[in-house]
Structure formats: C-alpha cells, structure tokens
Image (spheres, rainbow, N blue to C red):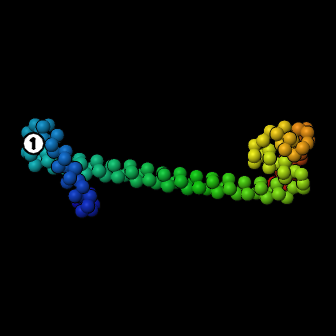
Amino acid sequence: RFTGTSADAEDAAQEVCFALVDKLKKFRGDSSFTTWLYRVVVNTCHDMRKKRSNAASLDTRYTELDGMLRAEKAEQTKQVSWLYRAIAALKPPLPETALLVLAEDLSHAEAGKILGVAESTISWRMHEVRKQLKEAAS
C-alpha cells in the first residue's frame, strides 16, 4: 500500500531486511518491536519514493536538456547549410577564398599563397564576401 506496486513492495521489503542488521542495534525498546519495525518500513518506503521522485525529476530535466541541445544543433546545421549555399552563390574567386579562410581556418597570408595572390587581395575578397553575405541574409 505504501509503494503502489508489488514489485516496489518487494524492493522495500528487501531494503528493510538489509537495513535491519544495523538498525536492530539502535532499537531501545521504548515502544513495542512491531511499532518500531512498522516505523522502519514506513521510513524505507518514504525514502524509496523520494529517490524515485528525484530520479524522475532528473530524467525529465535530462529530456528537456536533450531536446534543447537537439534544437540548437538543428539550428546550427541550418545556419551552416545556408552559409555554404550562400558562399557557393558568390562569383569566383570569392567562394574559394571564403572556403579557405572560413572553412579551413587559414590566415589571409596562407590563403594568398595557395591562390597565388597577395595577402591584401585576400583581405579585400573577404571584405566583399562579408558584405555580400550580409546582403544575402537581409
């Protein structure tokens, strides 16, 4: 009756049996043994209910957090997809420059060496990329 299910009652009975080994030493005899034992059982059921409630609360919080993380990941994927489509729509040589600098994380000097142009040219191209991406986002 205290646990709600027979499986939980069996678990509670097992917990009480394990706990009795230590608790018997603390029995003072102020009340009858059955009254004392009843109190141990009630406390054990109460503790089990509290643990299950806390576990359920944690499970709910985890589920909510997982949902938020999935939504955030989906939004990031959407943004990255848009960015790659927008870069692909740029006129050459801007897409190659943007991919080297943004996707490959190369410096302007490194991208310039790869593309065979001056670092200042890469800087100008990236300025154009940012300007055109900003316009595309509007």
Residue marked by disc 1: 31
For this rendering, which residue is in front, 77 or 31?
Answer: 77
Q: Which residue is drawn at 33% across and 49% down?
A: 50
Can residue 50 be seen in the rendering of this structure?
A: yes
Image quadrant assignment for residue 81: bottom right
Can residue 138 be seen in the rendering of this structure?
A: no
In the figure, is residue 115 to the left or right of 81? Answer: right
For the view shown, which residue lies furthest in the bottom direction?
A: 6
How many numbered marks does the figure carry? 1
Q: Where is residue 78 shown, x and y percent of the image?
A: 70, 57
Mark 1 secondary-structure assignment: loop
Q: Which residue is drawn at 79% across and 58% down?
A: 85
Q: Where is residue 102 shown, x and y percent of the image?
A: 77, 46
In the figure, is residue 7 to the left or right of 70? Answer: left
The quarter of the rendered structure image containing the C terminus is bottom right
* Residue 69, above or below 122: below
Q: How crowded is mark 1: few (under 14 residues within 10 Å), some or many (20 or more)?
A: few
Q: Which residue is drawn at 53% across and 51% down?
A: 65
Q: Where is residue 101 shown, x and y percent of the image?
A: 80, 44
For this rendering, which residue is in front, 95 or 18?
Answer: 95
Image quadrant assignment for residue 23: top left
Q: Which residue is drawn at 84% across and 52% down?
A: 95
Q: Where is residue 110 shown, x and y percent of the image?
A: 82, 39
For this rendering, which residue is in front, 46 or 101?
Answer: 101
Q: What residue type is labelled 1?
A: Ser
